[in-house]
Amino acid sequence: MQTDGSTTRPPRSPGAPTLLYARPGIVVTGERFTVGRNSWPVADITQLWTARGPHDRLALRAVAVSAALIGAVGVLLGFTGGLQRLTAAAYLTLGAVGVLPLLLVLVGDRWRPPAYELWGRLAGAEVLLFSSDDERQFGQVTRALQRAREGVRHGGWTDPPAAAAWRPNR
C-alpha cells in the first residue's frame, strides 16, 4: 500500500493489446482499428487524412429547385415584357426571393452539417476508415489512431523500465 497517496497500475500482461479508444462500435488498440464490422491492422494503414463529407442531399435539392424556379420566373418576366411594368416593391421582392437559395444553403449546413471523414491508404487503395458528424468523437478517434500508428512505427507499446524508488536525504 502506498502511504504518499500515489497510485500504481498493475503491470500490463505481455499479450494484451494497448487500448487507446473504446466506444460502442469503435475500438482502437495498438494493433487494430475496428469500426463496426470492419477491422484493419494498424500496421497496414500507411497514410491518414481527414476530409469533410458531402453536403446534405435534401438541402442541395432545395437550393437547386428554388434557384431554378427563381431563374424561370425571371426569364418568363423578361420574355413577356413584364419587367418594364413592375413596381419598385416588386423588384425588391424579386431581389429578396433571389437570396432564398443562399439562405437555404446556410440553414442546411447548420441543420445537417457535412460529416467528418477519416481516410487511409490500405494496400495501395484509398479507404474510408471512419465517418462521424460529431466533431469531438471524430477528433478522439483520429488522435487514437495516430497514436497507434506511432506506436507501431516505434516498435510497439511497452511499459517504461521500473526505476528505483527515490528517497530524499534527511
Image (cartoon, rainbow, N blue to C red):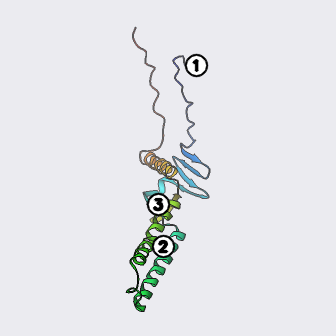
Q: What residue type is labelled 3?
A: Trp
Which secondary structure lies at badge 1?
loop
Q: Which residue is drawn at 50% across and 71% down?
A: 60
Number of the front mark, 2 or 1: 2
Is residue 96 shown above or below 152?
Answer: below
Residue 1 has which mark?
1
Q: How crowded is mark 3: few (under 14 residues within 10 Å), some or many (20 or more)?
A: some
Q: How far apart are marks 1 and 3 (CA)?
A: 47 Å
Alpha carbons under labels 3 and 2: distance apart: 29 Å
Label 1: how many residues lie within 10 Å, few (<14), some (14-19) or many (20+)? Answer: few
Residue type pointed to by label 2: Val
Res. 115 visible in picture: no
The quarter in which the C terminus is drawn is top left
Q: In this view, does 28 lie above or below 78?
A: above
Residue identified by numbered label 3: 119
Left or right placement of residue 7 versus residue 95 in this view: right
Residue 8 in the image, given as x and y percentages of width and height:
54, 27
- Residue drawn 62% across and 50% down? 24
Query: Disc 3 on helix, strand or loop?
Result: strand
Residue bearing mark 2: 63
Q: Camera-side residue: 7 or 50?
A: 50
Q: Closer to the camera, 148 or 16?
A: 148
Task: Name the residue at the top extreme.
Answer: 170
Chain-order first, disc 1 or disc 3: 1
Kind of residue at disc 1: Met
**Total of numbered circles in the picture?**
3
Using the image, tell me which numbered label, if any, was put on residue 101. none
* Residue 44 on image: x %, y %: 48, 57
Q: Earlier in the sequence, mark 2 or mark 1?
A: 1
Which residue is pictured at 54% across the width and 16% down the height? 3
